Amino acid sequence: MPKLWTETIDAHRTAVRDATLDTTAALVAQRGLAGVTMSQIAQEAGIGRATLYKYFPDVQAIMVAWHERHITAHLDRLAAVRDHTQGTASQRLEAVLTAYAQLSRQQHDTELAALLHHGEHVAHAQQHLRQLITDLIAAGARDGDLRNDVAPSELATYCLHALTAAGSMPSQAAVRRLISVTLTGLRLVTPTTAPAPSG
């Protein structure tokens, strides 16, 4: 098969898949997961039902694929923040954690969350994200900016759990305070002289 023809077919498949994912996500946001059918998706996306079934067996499979694409985009964004931020490892870590907190603040439908936040693609993404944070913390510890008395992987888990709370923060100012508190927990602890007992 000629290369140009192959590329055209691949581009068409990608376009159909993207249209299906975007259409389904929009319909689910409007009507809820139980209120969306494959026929509605095919009609709204402008494709035949038979074509749709070649790509996905049901609505849930479409939403899982949409979620996987969504998570991949978030990981790509965080990696880009890491790669394009100038400065020390701790400064790049702060930029990544800030971006993560902003992503966490985006509200998600609880019904969808219960369905989508399980599965191999989520576990893989969490592992990838945790490793990204771990590497930055380890680099910051080597630079002498971040604490080295706790394993970087443990500190990464602490950061991710702490900043997930950004989803329930009432304002951007509250999110910034949460980020500040989280970063304070990562900074190198310098020994201090205990105050002399009074009396």
Image: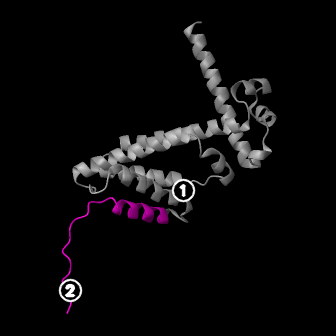
Total labels: the figure holds: 2
> In the image, is residue 179 part of the stretch drawn in magenta?
yes
> In the image, is residue 182 part of the stretch drawn in magenta?
yes
Q: Residues in magenta?
A: 173-199
- Asked if labels 2 and 1 touch by Cβ distance under 8 angstroms, the answer is no
Q: Identify the amino acid type marked 2.
A: Pro
The colour style of the image is one colour
Q: CA distance from mark 1 to mark 2?
A: 45 Å
Asked whether residue 149 is in view, the answer is yes
Instruction: Identify the residue at image location x=64%, y=38%.
Output: 64
Instruction: Identify the residue at image location x=33%, y=50%.
Output: 152
Instruction: Identify the residue at image location x=48%, y=62%.
Output: 175
Image quadrant occupied by the N terminus: top right
Write down the residue under mark 1. Answer: 105
Residue 159 % position (x, y): 42, 55
Q: Identify the amino acid type marked 1.
A: Arg
Write down the residue under mark 2. Answer: 197
Label 1: few (<14), some or many (≥20) within 10 Å? many
Mark 2: which secondary structure?
loop
Residue 179 % position (x, y): 42, 60
Viewer-side label of 1, 2: 2
Image quadrant occupied by the C terminus: bottom left
Sequence order check, earlier mark of 1 and 2: 1
Q: Residue furthest bottom?
A: 199
- The vertical placement of 42 against 110, above or below, is above
Residue 123 % position (x, y): 52, 42
Residue 57 % position (x, y): 73, 30
Q: Is residue 198 left or right of residue 176?
A: left
Instruction: Identify the residue at image location x=67%, y=27%.
Output: 16
**130 and 25: which one is in front?**
130
